[in-house]
Amino acid sequence: MIHPKKEKTLVILKPDAVQRGLVGEIIKRIENTGLKLVALKVTMATEDQLWKHYAKDEEWFLKKGNRIIEDRQAAGMPVDKEALEYGKDIVRLLVKFMTAGPVVPMVWEGNQAVGIVKKIIGSTEPLSSDSGTIRGDYTLDSYELSSIDERAVRNLVHCSDPVADAEREIPLWFTPEEILKYRLVAEQILYDVDLNGIKE
């Protein structure tokens, strides 16, 4: 079993975060928690990489597709596809969005890294994200608007959730050699049980 302070999570700053100049701000917000940045790059994602990344099952497609149908009906728009196809459109539109410009994937390490980052980023839909979260503070998109406009939700960031997703996703973006192992001085105050060496 991996020690909790060695838990890793994947964060990807999406094209909207890059285009809006929020890369440094988002990194700062995560870094301020004490998590350690162990991998980072600026890259253009590929379609194949993204379909592997957004590996969804039929149940997920149906659930999301039914929500889209409800949104379209509420807006008085026609429903011309089955729920499954509307669900698959979500990933199709995500792939289109994520390949529209550079993205910034990174790996963060530390105690409960997945949960800590998820809390900072906020819920997937910006509209319902709490104030104080990255999505709640820096964007205003909603499922309803993205559904009506037939595009991906512009929510700035992808973060792994749960831990099993992080373990599956990280190798899609980084080789083992690209993930650094080093010690941060701040780890002493975060993790050293006896705070050895603080006093002179």
Image (spheres, rainbow, N blue to C red):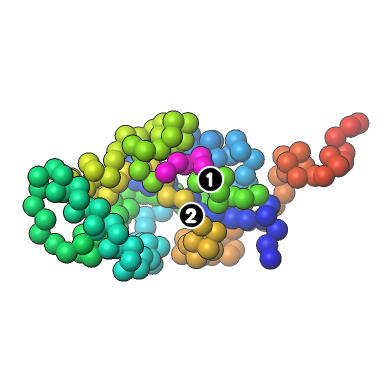
Q: Is residue 121 magenta?
A: yes
In-front residue for pair 21/66: 66
User: What residue is rendered at 10% in x and 48% in y?
Assistant: 77
Magenta part mainly helix, strand or loop? helix
Compared to residue 146, the image places residue 176 above or below, namely below
Q: Which residue is mark 2?
A: 160
User: Which residue is disc 1 drawn over?
Assistant: 117
Q: Position of residue 70 (x, y in %)?
A: 20, 50
Which of the 4 image quadrants contains residue 154?
top left
| Residue at screen point 49% across, 61% down | 165
Specify whether 180 is left or right of 156: right
Tell me the distance, in whole angstroms, between the alpha carbons under discs 1 and 2: 8 Å
Q: Secondary structure at mark 1?
A: helix
Question: Which one is earlier in the sequence, the residue at label 1 or at label 2?
Answer: 1
* 137 displayed left or right of 117: left
Q: Amino acid at mark 1?
A: Val
* Residue 143 at x, y percent in the picture: 27, 45
> Is residue 105 a member of the stretch shown in magenta?
no
Give the extent of the magenta segment. 119-123
- Residue beneath the point at 37% across and 38% down: 128
| Left or right relative to 100: residue 164 | right
**Mark 1, other Cα within 10 Å: few <14 / some 14–19 / many ≥20:** many
Indicate the quadrant containing the N terminus: top left, top right, bottom left or bottom right.
bottom right
Tell me which residue sits at (32%, 34%) in the image.
140
Question: Do tag 1 and tag 2 residues touch (Cβ < 8 Å)?
Answer: yes
Q: Percent x, y for residue 105?
A: 46, 52
* Residue 33 versus residue 114 in the image, above or below: above
